[in-house]
Image (cartoon, coloured by chain):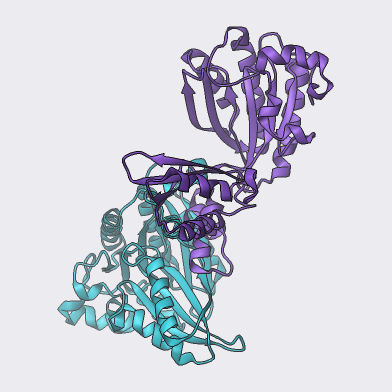
Chain colours: A purple, B cyan
Amino acid sequence: MAGIVECVPNFSEGRRKDVIDKIVHSIRSVPGIKVLDVESDPDHNRSVITFSGSKEAVAESAFRGARAAAELIDLNKHTGEHPRMGALDVLPFIPISGATMEDCVAIANKVGARIGKELRIPVYLYEAAARKPDRKNLENVRRGQFEGLRQAILADESRYPDYGPRMIHPTAGATAVGARMPLIAFNVNVRSTDVEIAKSIAKKIRASSGGMPAVKALGFSLEGRKMVQVSMNLTDYTITPISKVFEAIKKEADEKGVEIVESEIIGLIPIDAVCDLAAKFLMLGRFNSNQVLERRIWV
Amino acid sequence: MAGIVECVPNFSEGRRKDVIDKIVHSIRSVPGIKVLDVESDPDHNRSVITFSGSKEAVAESAFRGARAAAELIDLNKHTGEHPRMGALDVLPFIPISGATMEDCVAIANKVGARIGKELRIPVYLYEAAARKPDRKNLENVRRGQFEGLRQAILADESRYPDYGPRMIHPTAGATAVGARMPLIAFNVNVRSTDVEIAKSIAKKIRASSGGMPAVKALGFSLEGRKMVQVSMNLTDYTITPISKVFEAIKKEADEKGVEIVESEIIGLIPIDAVCDLAAKFLMLGRFNSNQVLERRIWV
């Protein structure tokens, strides 16, 4: 099986359906590309398109999407709640089956170079593709947004792009191109009416306050349900498996004398993460997703 | 997504490669059919072919396999260790994604009727497709094998076929056509040198001695590894989930003062069974295999 890569570009257009349709059409125009999801948010004035295919097809398709966005979107006329610096704002490549993070970093470089050269749009490599430590975090790359970056890219050496001209594109702005693992949105609900319990557990486990790497967590109260929620984004399940996160939360809850009611996976989860959980439950010595019956049929 | 059905016919030929190849070729001749596995055993003189496709494609493909076997295999010349009554000996249909057991029973009837009418081979419906309780068990259907059934089918009303002539086909014998769930081969290894512990746990959990339905289990010793094994076939994971089997074994092991070392899934496991285990581990309220990322990409 050839390697499959997922790509989740965010475009700065969430209102004009004809524009979004044209961008989707340009992405679909590459044979073998499967568009999995299109979500447009009018308040954010932003669309997130999810598609997948072989490494080569995804690279070509991503470039065509970038080109269509540069032709159709003028950021000078863009307003919306979500921060943005480009018509194609962010372009992450995500390894799925038979592809590695290194493959996705290579694709980010290949497509980033083309966007810089052929479209004359400055490109910043971010997350796993970042060449400078401060560019790992997208918020650093996007600081000042379209309007602020116009001056910063000229004056501030630390804002020079990785590819393309050292000036912002007059209508398409700048684009962040990167590579990252699939995100898993995972919530654990605890029986309590005290939101401080969820906040305290979240603080204990998240990377930013010294907990487990690749874990983002916040605590919320679930009004009217007599539960509080530890709401998480797991940014790399191969570094910190979900089972480890769950067990850490369980331990914290035990110590605080509260019980876990249930958990939720929001949206999608990679098959390898599901298989890892099954293997943990059953104490399986050797087990991997190649043993999933449907995988043989579908792939 | 159209419903996907798996089919695992067993043919009474495990030695002549050209014959096996021709049967595989006849199965592959239907568009959309994917042959997943071909295993031939010379001692058993038997081949097991695993293929999948839409309901319609699998029905046509299975019939073509039956026809090829009737043309190429003469049971009068067949010797081997495995009991058999037909050139195509057993033909089970198995529901996978978007197909139900009822769909598979319908396919068994459709293909069974064609084998009876067009090939003049008597057909017995077995397992979930059985119309008589004693035909649920394949061993009852196959009693006496090719040689014994020749007389029995004429003389014994209880051996009359469900489709086709009330006499055995002179060279192709008779065929059992059925529907069943995917099997899961699951072993649990326990730290002990006393095989009686594994045998006792197996007896406690298996359906045949009053344990859990859809569980077959035997106890073995694993020579030289200081472990004994509870070796299982789970014949319907929707009736008795693997998690329940594992927890029952764990409880028995605890009571006997022995510990589980590890488990094994031998071969393939349906994605829904894997998702169920992951959901149990995490106490997921709502979760199903549609949330598996790769499923969106592959299907």
Q: Nearer the viewer, residue A190 or A29?
A: A190
Where does the image place residue A154, in percent across and percent down from the top left? 81, 13
In which image quadrant can residue A68 be found? top right
Where does the image place residue A274, in percent across and percent down from the top left? 51, 54
Determine the residue positioned at 37% across, 48% down.
Answer: B286
Q: Nearer the viewer, residue A264 or B91?
A: A264
Taking the view exactly as shown, the residue that stands out farthest to the right is A157
In this image, A166 relative to A56: left or right? right
Q: Is residue A299 in sight in this rendering?
A: no
Compared with residue B228, is residue B63 higher up or lower down, i.e. above or below?
Answer: above
In this image, A177 relative to B23: left or right? right
In this image, A267 relative to B55: left or right? right
Where does the image place residue B47, in percent across and percent down from the top left? 48, 70
In which image quadrant can residue B201 be found? bottom left
Q: Nearer the viewer, residue A88 or B121?
A: A88
Compared with residue A209, is residue A19 higher up or lower down, i.e. above or below?
Answer: above
Determine the residue positioned at 33% across, 64% down.
Answer: B180
